[in-house]
Image (spheres, grey):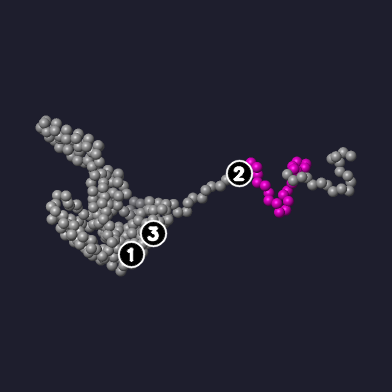
C-alpha cells in the first residue's frame, strides 16, 4: 500500500504542530490558543514623557522677595545685612583686644541663629580702562598721552595675569514662625531633598496676615539687634531692600552674566499694558458718511 494512501475506516491523521496548512489555506487558531503575531510587523512603542520635569524654579530655595525680606519655600523668612570690612592688621594691640571683646559680647547677645557670608567675586577692569581711554583722548599733552598709554597697558596686563578679587560681607538673619531649633532640622532635610532631586514640584506657600506681620516685626527686631552690635565693633552695615536682594540673587546665580549685563533701575522702567474692562464692550461710533452708506 502506498504510504500516503489512507485505509478505509481509519480517522484522518492530524497534521503535526507547526506544519503548514493543507490546500494552501491557513488554519484558524484553535480555541484557547493565542494567535501568533505577524512575522514582518514589529510593535512600535513610544516612550511616555516625564510627568514632572525638573525646572529652574523648582531648584530655588526661596519663594518670593517682599518688604525687604526673603520668603523661603518652607515658610521661613530671611533678611540680609551688608557690611563693610575694617583693617584689623593696622590696629594697635589695645584696639585689637577691644574689637575681640566687643565681637565676643556681640555673639553672646544673639538669641537666634545667624549666618556670616563672605563672597569673593572677580572685579571687572573694563569700565576703568574705558574711562582711562576717554581721558587720554581728551588730553592734549603728548607726554601725558604716552604715560597714560603705558599705564593702560600695565593695568590690562595685570588684570590678565592676576585675578583681582573683591570681597563682600553679609549677615543673614533668619526667622522661623514655628520655632528655631525644630525648623532648622526640617529646613536641613528639605535642603538635602531639593539638592538630590527629592522635591520635583514647587509648593505654594500660604501665610496668614497676622503671621506675616509678626514675622516682619521679629525680623526688624533681629536686624536692629545685629546692626547695633556691629556698630559697636566699628563695622558699617545696612539692610538690603527688595531690589538689592533681587540683584544679589541675580549676581549669585549668574556670576559671569552679571558683570556684563547688570540689572537696571526698575523704578524708571515704564511699559504700557492692556487690562480687560468690566461690563459689555461699547458699540463703535459711526460718522454721518458711514451711517449713510450703511
- The residue at 33%/57% (across/down) is 62
- The residue at 35%/56% (across/down) is 61
Please tell me which of labels 1 and 2 falls first in the chain. Answer: 2
**CA distance separating discs 1 and 2:** 60 Å
The answer to which image quadrant residue 186 occupies is bottom left
Of marks 1 and 2, the one in the foreground:
1
SS for tag 1? helix
Q: Is residue 81 left or right of residue 283?
A: left
Label number found at residue 42: 2
- The residue at 33%/64% (across/down) is 181
Q: Is residue 138 left or right of residue 10?
A: left
Quadrant, the N terminus: top right
**CA distance separating discs 2 and 3:** 48 Å
- Asked if labels 1 and 3 touch by Cβ distance under 8 angstroms, the answer is no
- Asked if labels 3 and 2 touch by Cβ distance under 8 angstroms, the answer is no
- The residue at 28%/53% (across/down) is 246
- Pointer 1: what residue? 181
- The residue at the far front in this view is 93
Please tell me which of labels 3 and 1 falls first in the chain. Answer: 1
Q: Residues within 10 Å of mark 1 (few under 14, many from 20)?
A: few
Task: Please check the rendered image and state whether residue 21 is part of the magenta-colored stretch, yes or no.
Answer: yes
Q: In this view of the protein, can residue 255 be seen by the observer?
A: yes
Q: Position of residue 32 (x, y in %)?
A: 71, 54
- Is the stretch drawn in magenta largely helix, strand or loop? loop
Specify start and end residues of the magenta stretch as a single range: 19-42
Amino acid at each position: 500500500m502506498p504510504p500516503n494512501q489512507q485505509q478505509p475506516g481509519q480517522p484522518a491523521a492530524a497534521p503535526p504542530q507547526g506544519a503548514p496548512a493543507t490546500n494552501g489555506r491557513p488554519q484558524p487558531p484553535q480555541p484557547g490558543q493565542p494567535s501568533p503575531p505577524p512575522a514582518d510587523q514589529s510593535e512600535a512603542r513610544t516612550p511616555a514623557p516625564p510627568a514632572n520635569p525638573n525646572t529652574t524654579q523648582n531648584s530655588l530655595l526661596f519663594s518670593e522677595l517682599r518688604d525687604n525680606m526673603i520668603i523661603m519655600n518652607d515658610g521661613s523668612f530671611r533678611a540680609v545685612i551688608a557690611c563693610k570690612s575694617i583693617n584689623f592688621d593696622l590696629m594697635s594691640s589695645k584696639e585689637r583686644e577691644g574689637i575681640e571683646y566687643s565681637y565676643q559680647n556681640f555673639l553672646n547677645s544673639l538669641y537666634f541663629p545667624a549666618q556670616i557670608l563672605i563672597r569673593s567675586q572677580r572685579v571687572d577692569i573694563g569700565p576703568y580702562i574705558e574711562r582711562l581711554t576717554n581721558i587720554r583722548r581728551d588730553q592734549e599733552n603728548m607726554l601725558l598721552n604716552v604715560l597714560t598709554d603705558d599705564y593702560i597697558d600695565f593695568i590690562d596686563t595685570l588684570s590678565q595675569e592676576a585675578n583681582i578679587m573683591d570681597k563682600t560681607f553679609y549677615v543673614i538673619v533668619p526667622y522661623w514662625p514655628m520655632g528655631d531649633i525644630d525648623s532648622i532640622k526640617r529646613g536641613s532635610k528639605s535642603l538635602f531633598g531639593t539638592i538630590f532631586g527629592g522635591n520635583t514640584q514647587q509648593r505654594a506657600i500660604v501665610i496668614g496676615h497676622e503671621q506675616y506681620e509678626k514675622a516682619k516685626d521679629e525680623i526688624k527686631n533681629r536686624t536692629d539687634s545685629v546692626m547695633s552690635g556691629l556698630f559697636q565693633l566699628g563695622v558699617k552695615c545696612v539692610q538690603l531692600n527688595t531690589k538689592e536682594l533681587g540683584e544679589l540673587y541675580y549676581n549669585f546665580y549668574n556670576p559671569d552674566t552679571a558683570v556684563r549685563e547688570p540689572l537696571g533701575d526698575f523704578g524708571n522702567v515704564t511699559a504700557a499694558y492692556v487690562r480687560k474692562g468690566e461690563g459689555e464692550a461699547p458699540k463703535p461710533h459711526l460718522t454721518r458718511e458711514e451711517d449713510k452708506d450703511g
